[in-house]
Image (cartoon, rainbow, N blue to C red):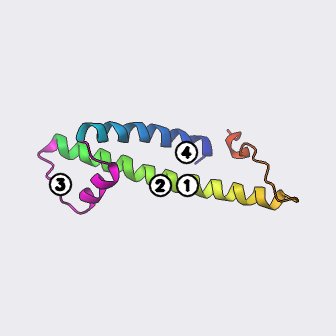
C-alpha cells in the first residue's frame, strides 16, 4: 500500500471513528476493549452490524498507523544517514510522490 493511500485511509477512518464516538460517547479504544472481550450487548442485527463496523474501522486504523510509523521511521533513518553536520533537513518523503 502506498503512503498516499495510507494517509487517506487514516483520515477517513478518523472521521468514521469520531462519528461512532459522538453517537455513543465512548472512545474507540474503550469500545474496542469491550468488543474484544465480548462484553457488549449488541441488541439485535442492526447494533451487531454497527459494532462490527466500528471494531473493523478501529482495527484498520491501528494497522494503517503501524504501516505509517514504519514508513516514517524508515524515512527518518535515511535522513539521519544523509546528514554530515548533525542537523537534519526535513524534506517531503519521496514516497508521497509515487503514483
- Vertical arrangement, residue 44 with respect to residue 29, above or below: above
Residue at x 55% of width, y 45% of height:
6
Q: What stretch is highlighted in magenta?
A: 25-45
Label 4 residue SS: helix
**Numbered disc in front, either 4 or 3:** 3
Query: Residue 82, located in which quarter of the rendered image?
Result: bottom right
- Which residue, given by chain and number where applicable, does mark 1 sit on? 67
Badge 3 density bin: few <14, some 14–19, many ≥20, Cα 10 Å: some
**Going by the picture, which residue comes out furthest to the right?**
84
Badge 4 density bin: few <14, some 14–19, many ≥20, Cα 10 Å: some
- Which residue, given by chain and number where applicable, does mark 4 sit on? 6
Badge 1 density bin: few <14, some 14–19, many ≥20, Cα 10 Å: some
Residue at x 18% of width, y 59% of height:
39
Label 3 residue SS: loop
- Which residue, given by chain and number where applicable, does mark 3 sit on? 40
Q: How many labels does the image show?
A: 4
Asked whether the beta carbons under mark 1 and mark 4 sit within 8 Å of each other, the answer is: yes
- Which residue, given by chain and number where applicable, does mark 2 sit on? 63
Residue 70 forms part of the magenta stretch: no
Precedes in sequence: disc 2 or disc 4: 4
Measure how far apart labels 2 and 3 are at the Cα level: 23 Å
Label 2 residue SS: helix
Precedes in sequence: disc 1 or disc 3: 3
Measure how far apart labels 1 and 3 are at the Cα level: 29 Å
Amino acid at each position: 500500500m502506498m503512503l498516499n493511500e495510507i494517509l487517506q485511509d487514516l483520515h477517513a477512518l478518523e472521521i468514521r471513528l469520531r462519528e461512532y464516538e459522538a453517537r455513543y460517547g465512548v472512545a474507540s479504544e474503550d469500545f474496542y476493549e469491550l468488543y474484544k472481550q465480548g462484553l457488549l450487548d449488541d441488541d439485535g442485527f442492526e447494533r451487531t452490524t454497527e459494532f462490527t463496523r466500528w471494531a473493523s474501522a478501529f482495527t484498520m486504523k491501528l494497522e494503517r498507523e503501524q504501516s505509517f510509523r514504519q514508513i516514517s521511521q524508515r524515512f527518518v533513518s535515511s535522513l539521519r544517514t544523509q546528514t554530515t553536520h548533525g542537523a537534519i533537513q526535513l524534506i517531503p518523503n519521496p514516497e508521497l510522490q509515487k503514483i
